[in-house]
Amino acid sequence: MSHGGVMKAVLLFCLLSLSFFHRGAVYGSEYMDVAVSIPPQAYFVQQIGGARVNVQVLIRSGDDPHTYEPRPAQMAALSKSLVYFSIGLPFEEPLLSRLVSLNPSLRIVETYAGIERMPGDPHIWLAPSLVKVQGIAIRDGLMAVDPGHKEEYSKNYDQFCQNVDELDHTIRELLERVRKKDFVVAHPSWGYFAREYGLHQISMEREGKEPKASDLAALIQLMKERNIKSIFVSPQYSRKMAENLARETNGTIIAIDPLPWNWMDDMAETARAIGGSLQ
């Protein structure tokens, strides 16, 4: 081969290598592009995938998952992903159909598989025991597209589970001596958390709608009878309803986020807030 031919071959090889790296493909690159619906999932995937994953997140902490529509730039980024880790949110079904048409090789991993879900409540990421189940699906999904690093993903998952168990222990210590069990929320995000720790979530919102006047009157009476002074709100929804209830009950509004980026720390802080209100 002539000197010019050799140089052309080297240049072609370099261009192909850069192309693979930019796409985040697992073959010969440092990371792979994967996608998730919400920030807590990004935390789980990063803990298990480590530096080998570049995670695209659709919904941000202030977004409402019930009304979410993906932006064009997000669709463009998602069309290059190797894996989408779904979690069972209603918006995912039409979205994933569109994504598969754009990217037929996209692997979809249902992290909610095997979890018994409450009717109308998708918030399975707010119960540590269920997060470990989701972690298995994430680990196995990463192994499927990147089998060369199975041991690394397995080791990371084991460490992640150990950390989740420590969090669970911390939360149980925080909640084991509370005198009350009922806590009031504006939006019913915390049903799985409540079930996990023997608590009872009372929601102002009913089937996605604001309470009727009669429902609100009954809730005010219940809060007075049970001496409930805290109302928990989320950044994704309006505070107006909770503020009205706080005025009627001389209550305090406390913000807790069901879509935290730093899932581990935020879950512990939420448990402290809820536990403090139940003393």
Image (cartoon, rainbow, N blue to C red):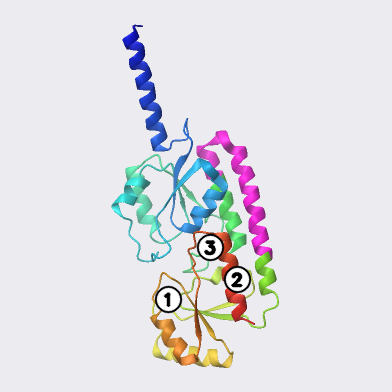
- For this rendering, which residue is in front, 113 or 70? 70
User: Which of the two discs, 1 and 3, labels the residue nearer the N terminus?
Assistant: 3
Measuring from the top left, give residue 16's x and y in whole percent.
37, 26
Q: Which residue matches tag 1?
A: 207
Q: Kindly report the secondary structure that dominates the magenta region of the rendered protein.
A: helix
Q: Which residue matches tag 2?
A: 271
Callout 2 amino acid = Ala
User: What residue is shown at x 67% (from left), y 66% (from top)?
Assistant: 170
- For this rendering, which residue is in front, 6 or 20? 6
Contact between labelled residues 2 and 1, with CB atoms less than 8 Å apart: no
Distance between mark 3 and mark 2 Cα atoms: 16 Å
Q: Residue furthest left?
A: 72
Q: Secondary structure at mark 1?
A: loop
Measuring from the top left, give residue 257's x and y in whole percent.
49, 68
Mark 3: give few (<14), some (14-19) or many (20+) Cα within 10 Å: many
Q: Which residue matches tag 3?
A: 124
Q: Is residue 43 left or right of residue 95?
A: right
User: What residue is shown at x 67% (from left), y 72% (from top)?
Assistant: 174
